Image (cartoon, rainbow, N blue to C red):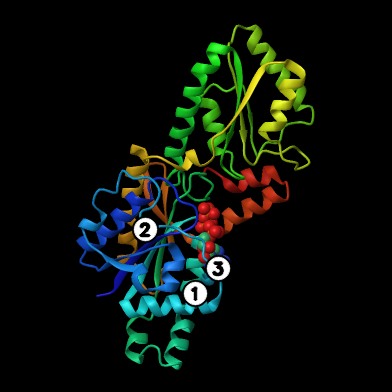
């Protein structure tokens, strides 16, 4: 008789709906009441119609849709204890003590803090008469499980995050489309690709599009990169190649930590080569469109596993995140992954690139 709620938080990614659907349906299948929380933590804090009971049909026909049908938001209120107190009351009043949070490291950190504070939040609600002693006892433990929805594949502890594969599809579709026109006119295309401080999208896009040059956040090029870039592009043209593709990660930088942008690269090509160079910034196109088959099945497996993990959780269990390890959906300690992910971000900010790559490990 304890409810399970699922919500999406932080940036959206393709496949989130498939994950929501799997969580809800597995919960209903196991005889548990399932809820949506709309607009992430904001909906949890505001309560009311933002927290809705879900049924089998309410997650019908969403598996193929991009984004998140239950909305996502960034929420200042939840960063304050007062906001989390309101959120706790909203959950207790509906009997929800199981949460699936689908988001990035920030959302998972917030969920972990909420779980740690849960007893003291309940004490406070009891003291001011908002909840009864019976409610406090009945709902004394909050269980949380995380799923990582992110196109960047920047979370430590999982081989793939939900949305990465679809984003790669968007990137490669755009590069293929541009390549045909670039080929006709012997152009050089400079593509700016997302990924913040993680070079996964640009490096994979570079390999599968036969790009001539890729600028990545983790491997800043030597200071004489303009000369090396020009030489490479010249070599390719003189070998008979009619088009050139250069990929610039949005977080690319030089060894001093200065950003390398698509405009910088274009200027080098314009000044030194007189190629017809054009910039394409893919931007939010990468987050858009339908999820790929891979993301749909990944999200289905992860969502179902998240609900199972919650149903099997005991008072002693540590919060977990559902990860992909090879081909297996596995449960790994949430805070270990979050801390490693944050350590990578810190190492990148401090320009300790080799440390960042080492810390990130396989994922
Ligand atoms: P993305 O990778 O897309 O940025 P994210 O989950 O890391 O996703 P954040 O903006 O960092 O995105 O976090 C989303 C929300 O999670 C915040 O708006 C806030 O409500 C909550 N949150 C994040 N960090 C904390 C924290 N330390 N304490 C409480 N709540 C937090």
State the residue position of label 3: 76
The image shows a total of numbered marks equal to 3
Counting from the top left corner in percent of width and height, residue 297 is at 32, 43
Callout 3: 10 Å neighbours few (<14), some, many (20+)?
A: few
In this rendering, position of residue 247 left or right of residue 75: right
Q: CA distance from mark 3 to mark 2?
A: 19 Å
Residue occupying the point 72% across, 19% down: 230
Residue occupying the point 57% across, 23% down: 211
Q: Is mark 1 within 8 Å of ligand 1?
A: no
State the residue position of label 1: 116
Callout 1: 10 Å neighbours few (<14), some, many (20+)?
A: few
Q: Nearer the viewer, mark 2 or mark 1?
A: 2
Asked if the residue at tag 1 contacts the one at tag 2, i.e. Cβ–Cβ closer than 8 Å, the answer is: no
Of residue 232 and residue 63, the one placed in the foreground of this image is: 63
* Residue 91 position by quadrant: bottom left
Residue occupying the point 40% across, 89% down: 130
Q: CA distance from mark 1 to mark 3?
A: 19 Å
* Residue 106 seen from this side: no
Image height of 196 relative to 112, above or below: above
- Which one is earlier in the sequence, the residue at label 2 or at label 1? 2
Counting from the top left corner in percent of width and height, residue 311 is at 30, 66
Look at the numbered disc 2 and give the secondary structure of its residue: loop
Look at the numbered disc 3 and give the secondary structure of its residue: loop
- Which one is earlier in the sequence, the residue at label 3 or at label 2? 2
Look at the numbered disc 1 and give the secondary structure of its residue: helix
Counting from the top left corner in percent of width and height, residue 65 is at 33, 45
Counting from the top left corner in percent of width and height, residue 301 is at 32, 49
Image height of 101 relative to 217, above or below: below
Q: CA distance from mark 2 to mark 1?
A: 26 Å
Q: Is mark 3 within 8 Å of ligand 1?
A: yes
State the residue position of label 2: 70
């Amino acid at each position: 008789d304890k409810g399970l709620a699922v919500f999406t938080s932080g940036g959206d990614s393709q496949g989130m709906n498939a994950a929501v659907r799997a969580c809800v349906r597995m919960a209903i299948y196991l005889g548990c009441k399932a809820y949506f929380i709309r607009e992430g933590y904001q909906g949890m804090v505001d309560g009311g119609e933002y927290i809705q009971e879900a049924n089998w049909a309410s997650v019908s026909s969403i598996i193929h849709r991009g984004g998140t049908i239950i909305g996502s938001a960034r929420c200042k209120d939840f960063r304050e204890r007062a906001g989390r107190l309101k959120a706790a009351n909203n959950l207790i009043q509906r009997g929800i003590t199981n949460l699936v949070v689908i988001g990035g490291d920030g959302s998972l950190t917030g969920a972990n803090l909420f779980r740690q504070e849960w007893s003291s939040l309940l004490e406070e609600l009891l003291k001011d008469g908002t909840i009864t002693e019976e409610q406090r006892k009945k709902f004394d433990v909050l269980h949380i499980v995380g799923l990582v929805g992110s196109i960047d594949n920047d979370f430590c502890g999982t081989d793939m995050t939900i949305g990465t594969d679809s984003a790669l599809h968007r990137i490669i579709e755009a590069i293929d489309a541009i390549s045909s026109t670039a080929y006709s006119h012997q152009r050089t295309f400079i593509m700016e690709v997302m990924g913040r401080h993680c070079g996964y999208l640009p490096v994979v896009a570079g390999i599968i599009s036969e790009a001539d040059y890729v600028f990545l956040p983790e491997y800043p090029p030597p200071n004489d990169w303009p000369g090396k870039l020009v030489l490479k592009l010249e070599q390719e043209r003189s070998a008979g190649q009619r088009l050139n593709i250069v990929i610039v990660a949005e977080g690319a930088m030089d060894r001093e930590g200065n950003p390398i942008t698509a405009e910088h690269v274009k200027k080098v090509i314009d000044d030194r080569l007189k190629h017809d160079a054009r910039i394409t910034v893919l931007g939010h196109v990468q987050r858009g469109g339908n999820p790929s088959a891979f993301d749909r099945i990944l999200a289905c497996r992860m969502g179902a596993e998240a609900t199972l993990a919650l149903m099997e959780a005991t008072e002693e269990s540590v919060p977990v995140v559902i990860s992909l390890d090879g081909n297996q959906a596995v449960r790994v300690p949430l805070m270990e992954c979050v801390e490693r992910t944050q350590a990578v971000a810190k190492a990148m900010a401090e320009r300790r690139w080799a440390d960042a790559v080492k810390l990130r490990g396989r994922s």
